[in-house]
Amino acid sequence: MTLALGKPASALELSPSVHWAQRHYRSPSFQWRRRIYDYELLFVVRGELLVTLRDEGISFPVQANAFLFLQAGSHHEIQVRSEPDAELLGIHFDFFDELEVRQDRDIIVDEQDVRSASFCALPLIDGAPALPSDRAIAAPGHVASLMEFIIQEWNGRLPGYELLCKSLLLQAIGLLMRHKDAESRAPHPKYEARLRTLVQQLEEQYARRWTNAEMAAYLNVHEDYMSRLFKDLLGRSPGSYLQSIRHHHAKRLLRETEDKIEAVALQVGYEDIHYFSRQFKKWEGMSAQQYRRFARLV
């Protein structure tokens, strides 16, 4: 039985606290089968997960570049389905600064000694849970960047880190809530299947040159209508979505390779290094070189 208690609230009443924040790697031999007292936000940087929510009786995949929100009290199982491992960003938190965590095991439910009063409340905003937990969330790449900053601050423990973690987490929650609202505006069913195929092609062929005319022709609609359909599905324009995918892969290359900035730009689809640099700073708030140095500290 899921014990998370719904608490009617407005977005302005949220006051989250971070309990744990790490970049971690899990192999297929590792498996979560547990409940937690707080909430967890996971971002799959690389690899694929299979999530089973036993109380709801559902299973679904979470692939690279997607988020997962796990509720307090929910019996969940998570399997890694990718070789050699999956790279994840993970943050445990509550919404109302209500759980005191002295050590990591305070987060995990001991089924032989369940502390029912410790399950953290789930905010119900306008009568609905703040975030969806029954599916993968394909949200803006900004959220993953915010998670990286939270992980850096939480592990660095410099003066003011708790305040910074709270403010960064509020931004991440706000962006996820905005995406949830946009997601509820489903595209016309006539175009949804081809539109999702187009999105998959963008994700797989992010480095090649795409035009609105080409995408509109694929759907057999006018360019303006194609943009509207795309925004109804993903909450953003095709150009913005493609930039977010390129930005995600640029960050991966900056973290994992020694390639020069110019080479990274070309690999993700930017022929003009100056344009790439402007776009990277716009998305990340720092230059590509600064990000590479930052990533090596985390």
Image: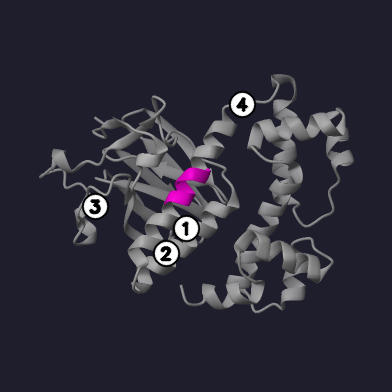
Q: In this rendering, which labeled residue sits more in front, label 1 or label 3?
A: 1
On the image, which quarter does residue 198 sit in? top right
Q: Measured from the top left, where is residue 140 in percent x and y?
A: 59, 48
Residue 211 is marked as none
N-term-proximal mark, 2 vs 3: 3
Residue reaching furthest to the front: 12
Q: Is residue 237 left or right of residue 56?
A: right
Question: Would residue 24 be seen by someone viewing this image from the given angle?
Answer: no
N-term-proximal mark, 3 vs 4: 3
Identify the image quadrant of the N terminus. top left
Q: CA distance from mark 2 to mark 3?
A: 17 Å
Q: How many marks overall?
A: 4
Residue 107 is marked as 3
Neighbour tally class for label 2: few under 14, some 14-19, many 20 plus, Cα within 10 Å: many
- For the residue marked with disc 3, what is the amino acid? Ile
Give the residue number, with chain letter if any, for mark 4: 185
Task: State the residue in front, 173 or 186.
Answer: 173
N-term-proximal mark, 4 vs 2: 2
Q: Which residues are magenta?
A: 170-175
- Is there CB contact under 8 Å for labels 3 and 4? no
